Image (tube, rainbow, N blue to C red):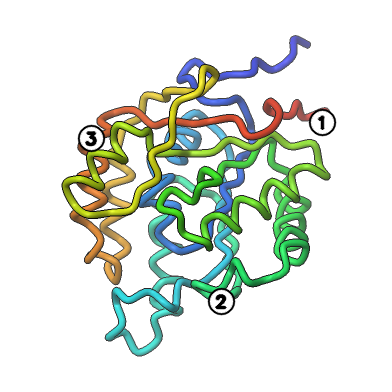
Amino acid sequence: MPAEPAFLPTGLPAGRRVLAVCAHPDDESFGLGAVLSAFAEAGAEVGVLCLTPGEASTLGADEPDLATTRAAELAAAAAELGVARTWLLCYPDSGLARQPLGQVADEVGRVIDDQRPDLLVVFHPDGITGHPDHQQATRAALHAAGSDGLAVWAWYVPARVATRLNAELGTAFVATPPAPADLRVPVDRARQRRAIALHRSQQGSLPVVERRLELLGPVEHLRALRGEARRDPR
């Protein structure tokens, strides 16, 4: 039987099972949504591990129980993206970076053992906007993946888009420079946009998200942080 190709015809890294590791409910949609739906439409079993319930958000503060609200939004948005399964942990929102890295990585490792993914998808190590929670989630995923031989691919916002957003909207996107091996993946944003709309408590951030999607157009950018997609021996 021939070896599985390293990349799918769509330009995505090949993998029958994909696990996204992120910090907050909405990261899977606002950030990774088009990539995850592309994996799902290519036939991959997609999982999402979210490490915090997002209870510290300044948006949706009038909700009586924001963590419960955001958990429901995550479930609905993930289903819209074609995600087969979600895991939601309860590390403190805006405090994830203060948690012991080994402990968080062990939690990621337990989900890896459960789902048996071929590769992980994360935010770029710069945290996209420099957010410490995003950075810690990626560190934990890399730590867990290293002990299991997994490939890790990072989503990032290219410098030209980050610079434009920061100039127009006063945001703090990190201007990540390109690298020769980076992937430019064609995407259809229809499911991502529907998933974004399901995070109703967080719609205050929508102008920034919409402008970013407009500037990116039908392309997302991925960078290999470690390895190639693991071949499944089963």
Out of 210 and 83, give the one closest to the viewer: 210
Q: Does 147 sit left or right of 48 as displayed?
A: right
Quadrant holding the C terminus: top right
Q: Which of marks 3 and 1 is nearer the N terminus?
A: 3
Foreground label between 3 and 1: 3
| Quarter location, residue 160 | top left
Quadrant holding the N terminus: top right
| Residue name at image x 48 percent, y 20 percent | 11
Q: Does 194 sit left or right of 147 as displayed?
A: left
The local crowd at label 2, few if under 14, some if 14 to 19, many if 20 or more residues have their Cα within 10 Å, is: some
Q: Mark 3 points at which residue?
A: 215
Per the image, label 2 sits on a secondary structure element best described as loop
The local crowd at label 1, few if under 14, some if 14 to 19, many if 20 or more residues have their Cα within 10 Å, is: few
Q: Mark 1 points at which residue?
A: 234
| Residue name at image x 49 percent, y 15 percent | 9
As measured in the structure, the alpha-carbon distance from the residue carrying label 1 to the one carrying label 2 is 37 Å
Please state which amino acid type lies under the numbered disc 1. Answer: Arg
Are the residues flagged by discs 2 and 3 in contact, CB closer than 8 Å? no
Out of 230 and 224, give the one closest to the viewer: 224
Image location of residue 103, percent across then percent down: 76, 66
